[in-house]
Image (spheres, rainbow, N blue to C red):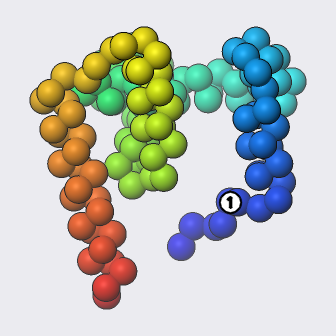
Amino acid sequence: MAEKISNHLTEQLCEAIASLKNKKQIADFLEDVCTISEYKALAQRFEVARLLDEGIKYEDIVEKTGASTATISRVKRCLVYGKDGYEAALTNLKKKHRATRSPKVARKAQFEKERAERKRAVRENE
């Protein structure tokens, strides 16, 4: 079982981020809180999530982002089995930019989500 991440410190961090009013304040906060490498890694992971959401193949993602296949696999696992944090952020950005997912990619993502939910239900019933 995964270690519990949520505690009063992580809640405080999330509250602090949510309190920021605009993109500049968030960027300034992240630059202060993260090392340059951490900040770039967060940005890279989000780009990997965006590309996976668009249905781009691993090889192309490696080429476009420089991310390792291990990083891509981890992000993919979060997209399928995670708490939908990437999905919420991607959906919000799409709404803001009026971008849409192709129907084929949307069907595939929905299928993977449903399959993950079925697997999770089977594990819980064991």
Q: Residue at 26%, 23% (x, y): give it.
A: 101
Query: Residue 65: x and y, percent?
Result: 46, 17
Q: Residue at x 79, y 32 (%)?
A: 19
Residue 92, x across and y down, in percent: 47, 27
Determine whether, in the image, residue 55 is placed left or right of residue 11.
Answer: left
Residue 74 visible, this angle: no
* Amino acid, disc 1: Ile
Residue at position x 28%, y 19% from top?
A: 100
- x and y, in percent, of residue 64 in the image: 40, 13
Q: Which residue is mark 1?
A: 5
| In the foreground, 63 or 75 | 75
Tell which of 63 and 23 is nearer to you.
23
Residue 6 found in image quarter: bottom right
Horizontal side of residue 102 vs 47, given as left or right? left
- CA neighbours of label 1 inside 10 A, class few (<14), some (14 to 19), many (20+): few
Q: Position of residue 61 (x, y in %)?
A: 36, 22
Residue at the right extreme?
32
Rendered view: 49 above or below 97: below
State the image quarter where residue 38 is shown.
top right
Where the C terminus falls, by quadrant? bottom left
Which element type, helix, strand or loop, lies under badge 1?
Answer: loop
